[in-house]
Image: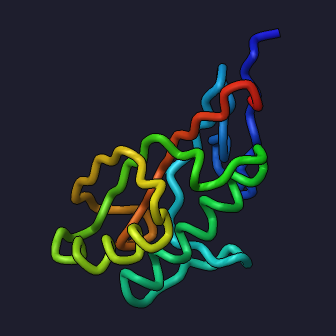
Amino acid sequence: MSGIRRIASPLPLPFSRATMAGGFLFLSGQIPYDAQGEVVRGSIQDQTHAVFDRLIEGLALADASLADVVKATVWLSDMALFADFNKVYAERFGDTLPTRSLVEAKLAKSVDVEIEVQAWLGDRA
């Protein structure tokens, strides 16, 4: 047994939604989809809330939460969105802010934000 557990993506794409290895949980990057799998358009705040909703769903599949996240990587389509993005990011993480990297990039489906996270589950993994 390898000690690695993969959680399948609900999308018909060739990647795992999450992978557990050792005490870590790695979530694939999430873009703003709603619960029905439709891309959320609109403000960066609307898109960021949708991404966090999907991150929370993915974490919950491993009995984890945002409080377990130790590292986040963020891609924004335009750094002009940084301040408005940060408001939602800070609100959603609250007092459990993880370390973070953030860069500007052209994103799939022409969305404005993508976030991937890594969480520490320790013995719960």
Q: In the rendering, at what x and y percent does residue 44 appear?
A: 36, 81
**Residue drawn at 59 percent across, 73 percent down:** 33
Q: Residue furthest top?
A: 1
Q: Is residue 106 left or right of residue 57?
A: left
Q: Is residue 2 positioned above or below 42 on the image?
A: above
Q: Which residue occupies 28% across, 62% down?
A: 106
Q: Nearer the viewer, residue 11 or 78?
A: 78
Q: Residue furthest left?
A: 80
Q: Is residue 90 left or right of residue 83?
A: right
| Residue 59, above or below 47 | above
Q: Residue at x 47, y 41 (%)?
A: 70
In percent of width and height, residue 60 lies at: 75, 54
Position of residue 92 in the picture relative to residue 97 (left or right) = right
Please tell me which residue is depicted at 48% across the width and 63% down the height of the picture. Answer: 93
- The N terminus lies in which quarter of the figure? top right
Quadrant containing the C terminus is top right
State the image quarter where residue 83 is shown. Answer: bottom left
What x and y, as percent, mark residue 2?
75, 11
Q: In this orientation, which residue lies closer to the viewer: 13 or 78?
A: 78
Q: Using the rendered view, name the quadrant where residue 82 is placed.
A: bottom left
